[in-house]
Image: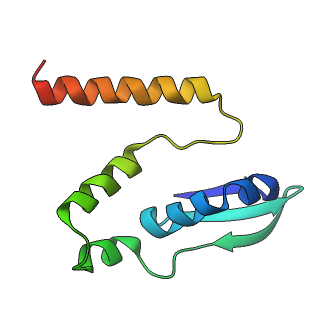
């Protein structure tokens, strides 16, 4: 997924941005006052890196899938709404798993 983020938000979320670029293959453009300054791109396709890496266990693959299914958190979003959607998603998964 390609997205644009302000330089201030990028500074606060730099670690998260790097994780998203590495694990999800996202492309992030950083801009200041509406002008692009830099772009963070993965070095190679993250899918080939994850599937081709023998050190990734099945448990780690499951955790990566869970991470990818989490909602994206933006600077302009209300944290309460994000938590509600995460809890709702967990309830749906639990009811599917339990057969309800």
- In this orientation, which residue lies closer to the viewer: 57 or 81? 57
Is 23 on the left or on the right of 77, as rendered?
left
Q: Is residue 30 above or below residue 45?
A: above
Q: Is residue 48 above or below residue 15?
A: below
Residue at the spot 34% in from the left edge and 77% down from the top edge: 49
Q: Is residue 55 above or below residue 21?
A: below
Number of labels in the image equals 0
Residue at the spot 38% in from the left edge and 23% down from the top edge: 88
Colour scheme shown: rainbow
Residue at the spot 58% in from the left edge and 57% down from the top edge: 16
In the rendered image, which quarter contains the C terminus? top left
Q: Residue furthest right?
A: 33
Task: Locate residue 81, reporting x and y percent.
Answer: 56, 24
Q: Residue furthest left?
A: 99
Q: Residue furthest top?
A: 100
Is 33 on the left or on the right of 72, as rendered?
right
Is 72 on the left or on the right of 7, as rendered?
left
Residue at the spot 48% in from the left edge and 40% down from the top edge: 71
Q: Is residue 80 above or below residue 24?
A: above
Which picture quadrant has residue 33? bottom right
Task: Locate residue 85, reporting x and y percent.
Answer: 46, 26
Task: Locate residue 99, reporting x and y percent.
Answer: 9, 23
Task: Locate residue 8, reporting x and y percent.
Answer: 81, 54
- In this orientation, which residue lies closer to the viewer: 92 or 41? 92
Which picture quadrant has residue 58? bottom left
């Amino acid at each position: 997924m390609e997205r644009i983020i302000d330089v201030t938000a990028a500074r606060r979320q730099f670690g998260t941005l790097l994780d998203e670029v590495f694990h999800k293959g996202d492309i992030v453009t950083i801009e200041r006052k509406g002008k692009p300054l830099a772009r963070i791109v993965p070095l190679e396709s993250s899918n080939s890196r994850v599937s081709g890496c023998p050190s990734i266990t099945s448990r780690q693959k499951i955790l990566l899938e869970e991470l990818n299914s989490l909602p994206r958190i933006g600077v302009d979003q209300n944290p309460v709404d994000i938590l509600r959607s995460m809890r709702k998603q967990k309830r749906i998964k639990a009811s599917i798993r339990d057969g309800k």
